[in-house]
Image (cartoon, rainbow, N blue to C red):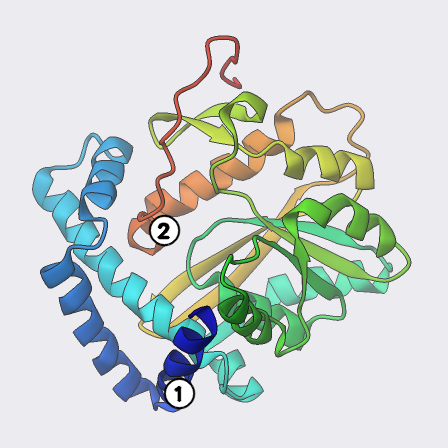
Amino acid sequence: MAKLSYYIALPFIYLLSVLPFPVLYLVSDFFYFVLYRVIGYRKKVVNSNLRNSFPDKSAAEIKAIEKRFYRYFCDLFLETFKTLTISPASMLKHCQMEPATEQLFKDFAANDQSLMIVMGHYGNWEWAGNTFSLLCKHQLYVIYHPLSHPYFNNLIIKMRTRFGTKLIAMKDTFREMVANRSHLSATAFIADQTPAPDRAFWMNFLHQETPVFPGTEKIGQKMNYPIVYVTIRRIKRGYYTFGADVLMLPPFNSTQEGDITKAHTKRLEADIVAQPDTWLWTHRRWKHKRPEHQSILK
């Protein structure tokens, strides 16, 4: 059944992928109407997340962000499929790396310095990976959660690796990073998903007690790589800029527990506040309560 559903969907996915951008966004407008107006996909989750994250905003302001988010969410969905057939030139036109950011990665490459990238589900993170692989000398590895559906998982792998990016399953992260020490690499962690509450660092994030993966910090300390924060800002429909700057440099022996986690989480929070409609609000980010024995990082 899984195989059948995949082969039924595949021609439609490729059809969406080859549509010119103006037509693609007309389709996205239709998806928005169905998803938001008809189905109401996770509207309660999105509205609750927004109200709790922005307690000072009025109901009208929350509703406006909510609508913009769903339009962005539908665009993101179709833009991801576009990766199957988009040309390198078109990719770089639609997701441009800032000159200072490109120079930053060139400087690291000139020093043969591998690094870690931290980011969130903010802007079009899929396109950002393509842009990095097209422009930078580092071999990009992205940490990901394999899908349970094997055929669609293979399609996602095909989309994400088309321009040279390689993937590492989350459970294999440290082992693979050690194996990759011999060559110039950049390993990207999308570090805003929900970890198990007992093994997480806890922070105040968007006015809420929030568990954050400790693995990014712990692996960074073990690998002793520079940690670079990446942000992808939406400039207008279908166009993004890729910016980055150094979050922390090794050695990390003088840092306190949680310092790296606090640094990248606060940067993401600032990005979300600046452009709230381009973060993934459908995610049940705050489904866990902080265990009593866990303290909040200050």
**Which comes before the other along the chain, label 2 or label 1?**
1
The disc at residue 49 is none
Q: Is residue 108 left or right of residue 73?
A: right
- The one nearer the camera, 8 or 40, is 8
Compared to residue 122, the image places residue 6 above or below, namely below
Neighbour class for label 2 at 10 Å: few (<14), some, many (≥20)? many
The disc at residue 280 is 2
Residue 202 in the image: state x and y as whole percent: 50, 23
Neighbour class for label 1 at 10 Å: few (<14), some, many (≥20)? few
**Amino acid tagged 1:** Pro
Q: Give yes or no for contact between labels 2 and 1 (Cβ–Cβ under 8 Å).
A: no
Compared to residue 83, the image places residue 194 above or below, namely above
At a point 43% along the width and 72% down the height, the residue shown is 80
At a point 38% along the width and 82% down the height, the residue shown is 8
Q: Is residue 236 left or right of residue 169?
A: left
Q: CA distance from mark 2 to mark 1?
A: 27 Å
Residue 165 in the image: state x and y as whole percent: 66, 69
SS state under label 2: loop
At a point 65% along the width and 77% down the height, the residue shown is 134
Residue marked by disc 1: 11
Viewer-nearest of labels 2 and 1? 1
- Looking at the rendered image, the quarter that the N terminus falls into is bottom left
